């Protein structure tokens, strides 16, 4: 599961569709409707939000908005009704980590999209997040360290 902190505009078509599916799964987990992925580290920041379901629903709404902008037909009725939430924090280090991770994926998957991204110096976060100083998120660093073993 990858719930990107980056703005969905940076994802290629395959990445945007995968994000939609994975965020819907995260919503189901937070609603208690799925027993899979309940302890996935990517869910930690949503669980820690004052209103976790509102946070994931707001996240999904922005993914839906990007898909609509591109002419895709995602089903907005799958997003749980929600109230507006205050932005969650994402560290600059986390955003930079994800930027490098996305670019590595696109090297293989979509070199044209990668070329577009290479023109961008400071990527923007998903609208649910605001950038704060700091390193890669602890939940990400622990997963990354395990995968390097």
Image (tube, grey):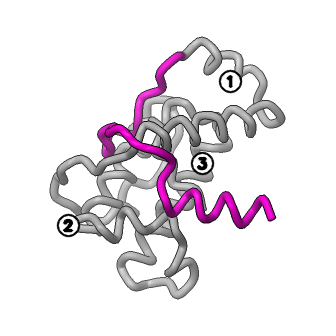
Which residue is disc 1 drawn over? 113
Determine which of the numbered discs, if any, sits on residue 17 in the image: 3
Element class at badge 3: helix
Label 1 neighbour load within 10 Å: few <14, some 14-19, many 20+: some
Give how far across and how far down residue 67 sits, in percent: 48, 39
Label 2 neighbour load within 10 Å: few <14, some 14-19, many 20+: few
Quadrant of image for the N terminus: bottom right
Tell me: 108 left or right of 33: right
Disc 1, disc 3: CB below 8 Å?
A: no
Disc nearer the start of the sequence (1/2): 2
Q: Note whether 125 is above or below 123 in the view shown.
A: below
Tell me: 71 left or right of 15: left
Element class at badge 1: helix
Give how far across and how far down residue 147 sits, in percent: 75, 62
Give how far across and how far down residue 65 sits, in percent: 38, 39
123 is within the stretch colored magenta: yes
Residue sitting at x 54%, y 73%: 40
Distance, label 1 to label 3, CA atoms, is 15 Å
134 is within the stretch colored magenta: yes
Which residue is disc 2 drawn over? 50
Give how far across and how far down residue 146 sits, in percent: 71, 66
Disc nearer the start of the sequence (1/3): 3
Tell me: 43 left or right of 86: right
Depth-wise, is mark 1 or mark 3 nearer the camera?
1
Q: Note whether 145 is above or below 6 in the view shown.
A: below
Label 3 neighbour load within 10 Å: few <14, some 14-19, many 20+: some
144, 8: nearer the viewer: 144
31, 80: nearer the viewer: 31
Q: Note whether 50 is above or below 13 in the view shown.
A: below
Disc nearer the start of the sequence (3/2): 3
134, 11: nearer the viewer: 134
Question: Magenta part of the protein: which range?
Answer: 121-149
């Amino acid at each position: 599961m990858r719930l990107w902190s980056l703005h969905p505009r940076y994802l290629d078509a395959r990445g945007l569709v995968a994000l939609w599916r994975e965020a819907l799964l995260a919503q189901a987990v937070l609603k208690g409707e799925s027993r899979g992925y309940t302890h996935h580290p990517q869910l930690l920041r949503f669980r820690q939000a004052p209103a976790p379901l509102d946070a994931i629903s707001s996240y999904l709404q922005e993914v839906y908005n990007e898909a609509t902008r591109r002419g895709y037909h995602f089903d907005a009725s799958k997003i749980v009704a929600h109230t507006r939430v205050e932005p969650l924090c994402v560290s600059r280090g986390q955003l930079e980590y994800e930027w490098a991770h996305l670019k590595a994926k696109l090297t293989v998957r979509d070199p044209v999209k990668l070329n577009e991204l290479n023109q961008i110096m400071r990527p923007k976060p998903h609208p649910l997040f605001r950038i704060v100083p700091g390193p890669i998120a602890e939940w990400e660093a622990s997963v990354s360290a395990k995968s390097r073993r």
